[in-house]
Amino acid sequence: MADIVNRIEGRGCVVRGSDIDTDRIIPARFLRCVTFDGLGEHAFEDDREQAKGDHALDKEQYAGANVLIVGENFGCGSSREHAPQSLMRAGFDVFVGESFAEIFAGNCTALGLPCVTLAGDDLATLMDSVELDPEQTVAVDLESRTVTSRAGTMEANVRDGTRKALLEGTWNATAVLVEAGETIEATAARLPYVNGFAN
Amino acid sequence: MTSPSSLFDKVWQAHAVRELPDGQTQLFIGLHLIHEVTSPQAFAMLNEMGLPVRFPQQTFATVDHIIPTDSQVRPLADGLAEQMLVALEKNCRDNGITLFDPASGNQGVVHVIGPELGLTQPGMTVACGDSHTSTHGAFGAIAFGIGTSQVRDVLATQCLAMAKPKVRRIDVEGTLGGGVYAKDVILHIIRRLGVKGGVGHAYEYAGDVIEAMTMEERLTVCNMSIEGGARVGYINPDDTAVEYLRGREYAPKGEAFDRAADWWRSIASDAEASYDDRVTFAGSDISPTVTWGIHPGHALGVAENIPQLTAVPDDERPGYAEALEYMGLRQGEAVAGTKIDVAFIGSCTNGRISDLREAAKVAQKGHVAPGIRTFVVPGSQAVARQAEEEGLDEIFKAAGFDWREPGCSMCLAMNPDKLIGRELCASSSNRNFKGRQGSPTGRTMLMSPAMVAAAAIRGEVTDVREVL
């Protein structure tokens, strides 16, 4: 069993822009490693360098934030789990956005980090609110499928299977998959290629 | 009589172990490919959980992302790269997994060697800790890119927990014009359907143009499915796929091959299969295509002009403006004639023998323009051997191109092959993201290998049809 993930609250950090890819979240040169340790400090490194202190992750008002608020198609591109690993190690526990790339969202679930989506208008309102008032608490609640802030309580979407896995603490898939036992071997035995089409 | 099904449904059903309590499917994975970047942490997690590798004979490894393309002599000059390779060697040795390292003669980019060794076959499920795993769908396999925790899942159980996606059928009808390649077809599809158009979908590619393609061309198309947001892309197996596999090292032999071919054909989508969505393109509408921006959907026919911001939908305008600024290009300008600094031919998208042949045809029409750095990187040792046997390496060298050893190289620049500063690279790879090719400010324009060769000899983005 993994931990139950339901309600996460804390301060928000707004990273605007669509189609932010995993190369930007963690540039490939930091993938030269055999553990995920130390990736946190390199999150968005090149974007931050180019923004010269003006990147959300460098702004003082967002220091200590644990709710990352992003735009559309966040995490597109490479399947590198190093991306959510680096954001997790930079202190983020949950992602709120308009939409997420599929592999990124799956990698987040495997780490117990929810990716929840809001309707475009709601997201814009939340972003404006958090930018104006970064001290406020943003609460993401999976049970009630809501995101609550001073901008109000908004209806959030999260994939049913993902939500269930997080709420029931079954997001460590290995532990769940192992439970299938010999059914795995039985399935393999039915596939003609597994024994080289011997008969 | 079962109702007509798509290949996707047939393969999914054949591999379903059980429905999981959260509603997802536990899916058996027939072929697991691993490499040095996304596997070491997975083995560490496995050890922590005290679990063995459950089906080591269904897992194969190679080294591609970090391998240098000048000298592959050990120890590698980059200590971190050497450490990753040592970890992979140890994990494979300890767990009885076959490793195709440079000494094996079969090393190469994971998505190049799987097909060429006959490991990838129709009707399989394939997983690899790399988003371009969709490549293997060219055979009619269902192939997923996965993260490292999922690599652990597959090592431990040979299964993944997956939600079943929708299936979109994409027909490309008619024929392609001269100088238009598989790369142009997929860039055109992504341009039209968008970089997130495929999220939640598997793409089934079909139609006259796809059916007429060789296996290598099909691999190029399926490779970039993920750039359109689709985690899976596939093509129904036919005679082209069957004949490609005949005689390959890991393909069945003799009577077993005949049994395999029957099963492979039976797994193809039925004529009356239904799809969640269908889209049709005309091959004649596709021209040599290049990207001008910072994702693969920022693509244009080479004769077109970069869009005016006023002509772009409101919600896309900020992204277009950001792309123009990063690339240093101006709205309304012709994309042809953009000066380049570097030319890269290679990658899992376009590092196969046919890609090198097409690029060499263009290379022999001229010489690399002054001041342009070039990298020609075969996708595998087998591709390199074949190219050298055909004398392609000599054609490239005579034209001033740098002929390298196999690896992922400048597609993602985890090895020493990198852009410097704001260099602009004409590249046959798959991603033009900011900083993708190793310099945080480096710039990438994606195109076919023949177009890259044309850009190298002219020193600027060039319509390859003018050179052929």
Image (cartoon, helix red, strand yellow):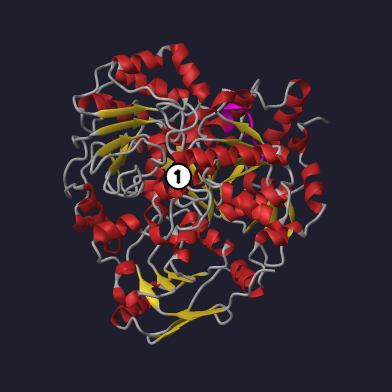
Magenta part, dominant SS:
loop
Q: Is residue B422 left or right of residue A2?
A: left
Q: Residue B90 in the image: state x and y as whole percent.
A: 63, 39
Q: Is residue B207 left or right of residue B318?
A: right
Query: Is residue B118 on the magenta stretch?
Result: yes
Q: Residue at image x 45%, y 44%?
A: B280
Region rendered in magenta: B114-124
Disc 1, SS: strand
Using the image as rendered, state which of residue A20 and residue A60 is in the foreground.
A60
**Residue at screen point 23% across, 29% down:** B372
Q: Which quarter of the rendering shows the C terminus of chain A?
A: top right
Which quadrant of the figure contains the N terminus of chain A?
bottom right
Depth check: B400 or B219 in front? B400
Q: Can the viewer see residue B274?
A: no
Residue A152 place in picture, x, y as percent: 41, 87
Which residue, given by chain and number where applicable, does mark 1 sit on? B280
Based on the displayed image, in which of its 4 quarters is residue B92 positioned? top right
Q: Decide whether residue A98 is among the magenta residues.
A: no
Q: Residue at x 72, y 55 (%)?
A: B50
Q: To which chain does the residue with label 1 belong? A: B
Crowdedness near tag 1: few (<14), some (14–19) or many (≥20) residues, C-alpha within 10 Å = some
